[in-house]
Image (cartoon, rainbow, N blue to C red):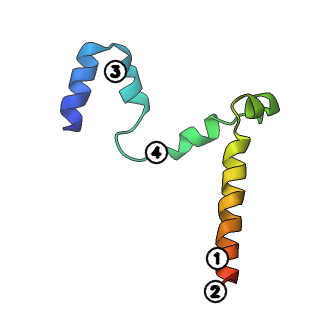
Amino acid sequence: MIRAEEAFLRHDSQSMTEYARRVPRFGIRLGNLRATRGSFSRELYLQHREYNALLGTALMLAVLVVKLLMR
């Protein structure tokens, strides 16, 4: 199924050939992780409201602690 989909996408889009060359079908290439280093941006963090994920995680951990203590 994956090969059929790749063939369809290659026929439909020229950029798929380059994408398929760079990205493995399964798993990740560990060498690519080193090349994608970036820096933290406070402006983007706030713009995309990523703090909501942090607040949600903290809330869920607090709920779990309360549940454990009430046992």
Residue under numbered circle 2: 71
Q: Residues within 10 Å of mark 1 (few under 14, many from 20)?
A: few
Marks 2 & 1, CB-CB < 8 Å contact: yes
Mark 2 and mark 1: Cα distance apart in space: 7 Å
Residue under numbered circle 1: 67
Name the residue type under label 1.
Lys
Choose mark 2 or mark 3, whichever is in front. 2
Query: Which structural element holds mark 4?
Result: loop
Hey, which quadrant is residue 44 in on the image? top right
Name which residue lies at 77% across and 36% down.
40
64 to the left or right of 9: right
Choose mark 1 or mark 4, whichever is in front. 1
Residue under numbered circle 3: 17
46 to the left or right of 61: right
Q: Is residue 42 above or below residue 58?
A: above
| Earlier sequence position, callout 2 versus callout 3 | 3
Q: Is residue 40 above or below residue 71?
A: above
**Which numbered disc covers residue 28?**
4
Mark 2 and mark 3: Cα distance apart in space: 57 Å
| Residue 13 image point, x, y percent | 32, 14
